Every structure is written in structure tokens, then in C-alpha cells.
Image (spheres, rainbow, N blue to C red):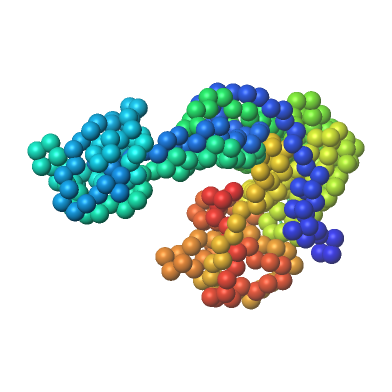
């Protein structure tokens, strides 16, 4: 056990030397959903660009108001129109989104106004700036509204459109190579013979990489031989920015990945004190970052979520954020401790407590589908009912 690297040290080690590996390009904003912003965005205009009305009603000057005074309506301002300066002592009919005329400093909503012929009475004294959305309320010209590294969401597309932006500088997508290994594996769709299982890590990793906004450049499956593994890696090295693999990283003589990595590049770390996911390997192949994820499907998932996801996001220029934990109380006891940090697949019950899925085998994947997230139980720690532990919902990865 003493040779296993601690979870936090491994995270630090894997991310420390990682750097942006992709170039930039300018693309139409409407095509930028899911892309990573390459440069800070500084607002060139204020939003809104003018003081405007938040209500349909009447714009007037608070100093003109008197109880019972009948105001004449000196102009009508619809949204999009350019207002005239307000005639002193009068009010303007105004609509939501219309610019406030110079000389007015408040808006009374029409429900609080009494129309008497062609005049209006405001029974309540209006407060200064009532129902006025001031210039720059949302964003001020010169303000940094988005930082480079941010992943563009539909809300960002709305925000940048409100600044009049039509094109944006983003990072080109990271090209990711995926290698799966194992003689027992066949692709879904093929008939299953004795001793075989379907390859689930390949499609799962492709989906995880795609979901994170990267491009799966090439997926290769290699047999459990050093030759096949080396050939596959050399092929991936020709076209990929980063390479992920699954399986073949443990200690058996059928596990060839680590040996081949030592021939092709430099291995930085192997074996981490986590469960599942212990035999994770991190290497560099001719400048290309490589992460070898253990083949058990839940080990692949956990090591992708905690290590590969962060590594890929740094290489893609994304702001690499570790998910924020929520402190959640355990709904069960477990006296057994292990010398590795554990990532239990748990559900949060209606009582707000965390319950471990009964199937925690690293070979089982259904448990992750039936759970809400990970309960992080530090090495050598018992689980006690009612004590709190860090919970990470799957949605935060
Ligand atoms: N003597 C020891 N044996 C093992 C150790 C150990 O410390 N000493 N560690 C165990 C742990 S922990 C893990 S995790 C596994 C990881 O092994 P590998 O990364 O070498 O993975 P494989 O042996 O290739 O496969 C493990 C398991 O997962 C299945 N698998 C592999 N790839 C896929 C895939 N693409 N889709 C679906 N399932 C996959 C494979 O059939 C095996 O059942 O090693 C332990 N052994
Ligand atoms: O530590 Mo391994 O990844 O569970 O079976």
C-alpha cells in the first residue's frame, strides 16, 4: 500500500504540467455553443444602453408631483422610439422598454394612475427612479463579462448577443484518442462467444469526451499483446492531442499498457490510493499527455471523472474546475476501513441522507446509473450514520 500515491497528490501531479494544446479560431457566436472562450470578453457598450421603463405607465419628474394634480400627457414613447425632453409639469405615456425622456426621473405603472379625460392623476407620491432600469444595470461598458476558459452555454450566447457580438474567439476542439484493450472484448452488435464481453468503456469514454466538448479523433481497440498496444498508441500519437486508454494497466502478464508506455515515452505515476481506480497510469508520449484508466468499468468512470476530465479540460483551454462537494450525512454505518480514498456510488434519500448502492464492485456499471453521485470517504475512515462526508453529484462532472 505504501507505494500508492495519495488521491490529492495524484490530482496535483497529473494537472501540474498540463497546458493548453489547442489553437484559437474566430467563429460565429451562434455556432459557439459548448466551445471554450479563448479571450476575455469586455463589454463595448452598456446594457441597457439607456435608462428605460420597466413598466407600461407614465414617466414624470418627481418634483412636479402634487397630490390631486392633473398631468397632461405631452408625448407618447413606445419601445424603440427616441423620446423628446419632457415638457416641465407634464408626463409622458411610456411603455416597457422605452427610453426615459430627459427631464423624467420616475415611472408610475398605469394601474396606479387615474385617467380623467385626457389628463392623469397619480394619487401616490412616486419615488425617485421607481420603475426605471438604469443605463448599465446589467453590464457596464468596459466591464469584463466573460473570462477566457469559460465553456459557452446558451445563456452566454444570449448575454453576448445583448452586447451586439456576432463573432467570438474560441479554442479549437481538443483531439482525443481512445484506446481500449482486452482480448475478451467485442463490439456491441457482434454475437457473444464464451469468454467474451462487450466493450462498454470505449463507447462510454467517447460519450464522456464528447459531452465535455472535445472531439474523439480516433478510437482503437488493441489485443492483449505488447505489439498491438504499441501499434495502436503509435497510430493515435500521429493525430491526437491527448490519449486515454482503458484496461491493461494492472500487474498481470496480459497487461501491456504500462510496459509499452515505458518504451514510447515517460511514465510519471502509476497506482493511486483510490477505490475504484487503483492502477491509473499517467505518462507523456512525445509531448502527448496520456492517461491509462483501469479497465473495470466503474474504475474507468471514476478515474475519467476525477483525473481525465480535469486533464482534458486544461489541455482544451477550459478553466479547470474541480467539482464543489456538498456535505451530506451518511444514512448507514460501515466499520470496515481501507487504506484508499473511496468513491462510493450513493443515492440521496428523501430524508436527505446518503445511501450506498448495494453493488460497489468496480466491475459493475448499473450501480452508477442508479445512483446520484459519489460519496468521498477518505482513506482509513469509518462511515458513521449521521456523520457528514463530501458528496459530489454526477451532474457536477
Ligand atoms: N494481482 C493483482 N490483480 C489486480 C490488481 C492488483 O493490484 N493486483 N488490481 C485490480 C484492480 S484494482 C483493477 S481496477 C484491475 C484493473 O486492471 P486493468 O486496468 O489491467 O484492466 P483489465 O485487466 O484489462 O480489465 C479489468 C476488467 O475490466 C474489464 N474491461 C476491460 N476493458 C473493458 C472495456 N473496454 N469494456 C468493458 N469491460 C472492460 C475486463 O474484462 C476485466 O474484467 O486489475 C485488478 N487486478
Ligand atoms: O481499484 Mo480497482 O479500480 O477497483 O478494481
Residue 393 appears in which quarter of the rendering?
A: bottom right
Q: Is residue 107 left or right of residue 295?
A: left
Name the spot of residue 274 as percent of width and height, x first: 72, 59
Name the spot of residue 110 as percent of width and height, x first: 21, 44
Residue located 60% across and 64% down the image: 390
Q: Is residue 92 at all visible to an observer of this figure?
A: yes
Residue located 19% across and 54% down the image: 67
- Give whichever of 119, 328 is nearer the camera: 119
Name the spot of residue 396 as percent of width and height, x first: 56, 50
- Give whichever of 111, 238 is nearer the camera: 111
Q: Is residue 291 left or right of residue 165?
A: right
In this view, 390 is above or below 281: below
Name the spot of residue 374 as percent of width and height, x first: 59, 58
Q: Given the current orientation, which residue lies at the most extreme right position?
A: 263
Quarter of the image containing the N terminus? bottom right
Q: How many callouts does the rendering have?
A: 0
In this view, 388 is above or below 376: below
- Give whichever of 225, 39 is nearer the camera: 39
Q: Is residue 360 at all visible to an observer of this figure?
A: no
Q: Given the current orientation, which residue lies at the most extreme left position?
A: 117
Q: Given the current orientation, which residue lies at the most extreme front position?
A: 88
Q: Is residue 307 left or right of residue 200?
A: right
Residue 318 appears in which quarter of the rendering?
A: top right
Residue located 48% across and 62% down the image: 348
Residue located 67% across and 46% down the image: 320
In this view, 383 is above or below 148: below
Q: Is residue 333 left or right of residue 180?
A: left
Amino acid at each position: 500500500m505504501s507505494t500508492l500515491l495519495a488521491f490529492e497528490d495524484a490530482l496535483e501531479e497529473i494537472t501540474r504540467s498540463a497546458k493548453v494544446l489547442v489553437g484559437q479560431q474566430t467563429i460565429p457566436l451562434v455556432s459557439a455553443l459548448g466551445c471554450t472562450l479563448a479571450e476575455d470578453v469586455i463589454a463595448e457598450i452598456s446594457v441597457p444602453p439607456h435608462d428605460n421603463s420597466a413598466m407600461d405607465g407614465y414617466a414624470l419628474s418627481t418634483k412636479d408631483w402634487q397630490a390631486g394634480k392633473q398631468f397632461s400627457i405631452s408625448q407618447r414613447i413606445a419601445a424603440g422610439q427616441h423620446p423628446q425632453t419632457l415638457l416641465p409639469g407634464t408626463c409622458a405615456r411610456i411603455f416597457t422598454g422605452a427610453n426615459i425622456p430627459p427631464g423624467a426621473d420616475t415611472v408610475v405603472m398605469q394601474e396606479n394612475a387615474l385617467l380623467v379625460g385626457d389628463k392623469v392623476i397619480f394619487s401616490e407620491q412616486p419615488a425617485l427612479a421607481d420603475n426605471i432600469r438604469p443605463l448599465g444595470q446589467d453590464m457596464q461598458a468596459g466591464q469584463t463579462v466573460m473570462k477566457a476558459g469559460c465553456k459557452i452555454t446558451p445563456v452566454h450566447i444570449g448575454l453576448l448577443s445583448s452586447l451586439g457580438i456576432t463573432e467570438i474567439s474560441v479554442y479549437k476542439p481538443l483531439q482525443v484518442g481512445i484506446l481500449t484493450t482486452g482480448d475478451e472484448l467485442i463490439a456491441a452488435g457482434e454475437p457473444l462467444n464464451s469468454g467474451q464481453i462487450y466493450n462498454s468503456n470505449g463507447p462510454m469514454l467517447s460519450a464522456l469526451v464528447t459531452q465535455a466538448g472535445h472531439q474523439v479523433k480516433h478510437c482503437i481497440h488493441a489485443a492483449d499483446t505488447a505489439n498491438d498496444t504499441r501499434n495502436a498508441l503509435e497510430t493515435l500519437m500521429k493525430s491526437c492531442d491527448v490519449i486515454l486508454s482503458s484496461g491493461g494497466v494492472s500487474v498481470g502478464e496480459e497487461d501491456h499498457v504500462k510496459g509499452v508506455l515505458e518504451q514510447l515515452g515517460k511514465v510519471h505515476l502509476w497506482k493511486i490510493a483510490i477505490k475504484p481506480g487503483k492502477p491509473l497510469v499517467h505518462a507523456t508520449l512525445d509531448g502527448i499527455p496520456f492517461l491509462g484508466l483501469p479497465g473495470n468499468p466503474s474504475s474507468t468512470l471514476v478515474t475519467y471523472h476525477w483525473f481525465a476530465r480535469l486533464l482534458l479540460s486544461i489541455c482544451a483551454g477550459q478553466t479547470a474546475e474541480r467539482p464543489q462537494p456538498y456535505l451530506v450525512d451518511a444514512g448507514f454505518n460501515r466499520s470496515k476501513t481501507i487504506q484508499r480514498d473511496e468513491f462510493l456510488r450513493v443515492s440521496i434519500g428523501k430524508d436527505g441522507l446518503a445511501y450506498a448502492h448495494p453493488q460497489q464492485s468496480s466491475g459493475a456499471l448499473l450501480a452508477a446509473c442508479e445512483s446520484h453521485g459519489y460519496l468521498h470517504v477518505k482513506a482509513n475512515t469509518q462511515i458513521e450514520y449521521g456523520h457528514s462526508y463530501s458528496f459530489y453529484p454526477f451532474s457536477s462532472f
